[in-house]
Image: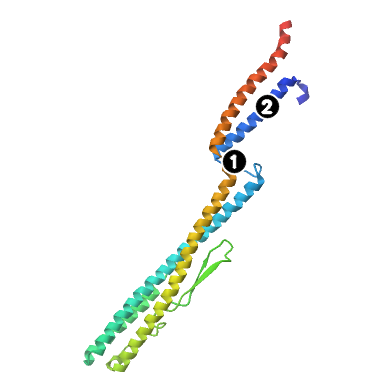
């Protein structure tokens, strides 16, 4: 059946069109109330929809980068823990060396040399145990790359160093500690090793500060992007609730008006 097969009065057709328009607006308002958004697809507002989508996608990409920053912080913390422990062992070794210098008993010096070598081996152990998730910045010159933006064009390279006895030039004492000059030379090497560790700790601290600052900045950027996305798409629930009440009232009045419009056509039946 085509549209022209049924003829409606002008009043009835006008009321029918108004009811159809009201029904469309009701459906749209119900969708906004259920989703909380005034822009649910590109059909609603192409400009706002795609702008909001781009902002949300960038926020998601930055969130992934923030996870990488958190892992980098843990790697640096593990490295710092290793340096702190190694520094403590070297200070203990210096105490052993001082004890060796204060005695002329070769048996005692031999025992102290053995203690020093034990401490030296523990330095190697701590160095090798200071990794985090497969990356150790104290066993070789590894590089931790921390990406800050979604394109990975902004980044920081945290470069490790060799913090075992070899890297710190701490040679084995063996039987050499029976000579004062050997003990003094090893003590000087320990001082140099501590100085090296302190320098690298300062570098790590600076890198950690950069990473944590970028973490805070990334949090702010994610919040800004999501807020901007919401401003473009979220509906005013108070306004939409008021719209729903008005549309329901309009629909009720339209139905009544359509009924009244049909009464003129029904009057012809009274002639029979």
The answer to which quarter of the image holds residue 122 is bottom left
Q: Determine whether, in the image, residue 3 is placed left or right of residue 111.
A: right
Q: Residue at x 58, y 37 (%)?
A: 31
Above/below status of 206 relative to 233: below
Numbered tag placed on residue 24 in the rendering: none
Q: Residue 21 appears at what percent x and percent y?
A: 67, 30
Q: Residue 134 appears at what percent x and percent y?
A: 45, 69
Q: Residue 69 appears at what percent x and percent y?
A: 48, 63
Q: Residue 200 appears at what percent x and percent y?
A: 43, 76
Spatial CA distance of label 1 from label 2 is 22 Å
> What SS does tag 1 mark?
loop
Q: Is residue 182 visible?
A: yes
> What SS does tag 2 mark?
helix
Q: Earlier in the sequence, mark 1 or mark 2?
A: 2
Which residue does the numbered mark 1 point to in the structure image? 38
Which residue does the numbered mark 2 point to in the structure image? 18
């Amino acid at each position: 059946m085509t549209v022209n097969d049924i003829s409606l009065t002008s009043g009835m057709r006008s009321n029918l069109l108004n009811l159809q328009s009201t029904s469309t607006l009701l459906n749209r308002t119900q969708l906004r109330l259920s989703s909380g958004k005034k822009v649910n697809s590109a059909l609603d507002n192409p400009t706002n929809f795609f702008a909001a989508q781009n902002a949300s996608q960038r926020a998601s990409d930055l969130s992934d980068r923030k996870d990488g920053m958190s892992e980098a912080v843990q790697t640096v913390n593990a490295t710092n823990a290793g340096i702190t422990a190694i520094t403590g062992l070297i200070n203990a070794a210096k105490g052993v060396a001082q004890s060796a210098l204060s005695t002329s008993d070769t048996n005692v010096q031999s025992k102290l040399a053995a203690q020093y070598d034990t401490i030296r081996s523990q330095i190697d152990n701590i160095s090798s145990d200071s990794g985090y998730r497969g990356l150790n910045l104290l066993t070789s010159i590894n590089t931790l790359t921390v990406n800050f933006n979604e394109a990975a064009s902004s980044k920081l390279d945290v470069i490790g160093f060799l913090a075992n006895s070899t890297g710190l030039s701490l040679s084995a004492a063996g039987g050499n500690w029976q000579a004062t000059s050997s003990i003094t030379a090893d003590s000087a090497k320990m001082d140099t090793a501590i100085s090296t560790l302190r320098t690298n700790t300062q570098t790590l601290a600076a890198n950690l500060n950069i990473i944590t600052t970028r973490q805070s900045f990334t949090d702010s950027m994610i919040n800004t992007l999501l807020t901007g996305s919401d401003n473009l798409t979220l509906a005013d629930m108070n306004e939409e609730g008021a719209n729903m009440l008005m549309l329901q009232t309009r629909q009720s009045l339209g139905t009544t008006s359509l009924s009244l419009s049909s009464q003129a056509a029904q009057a012809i039946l009274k002639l029979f």
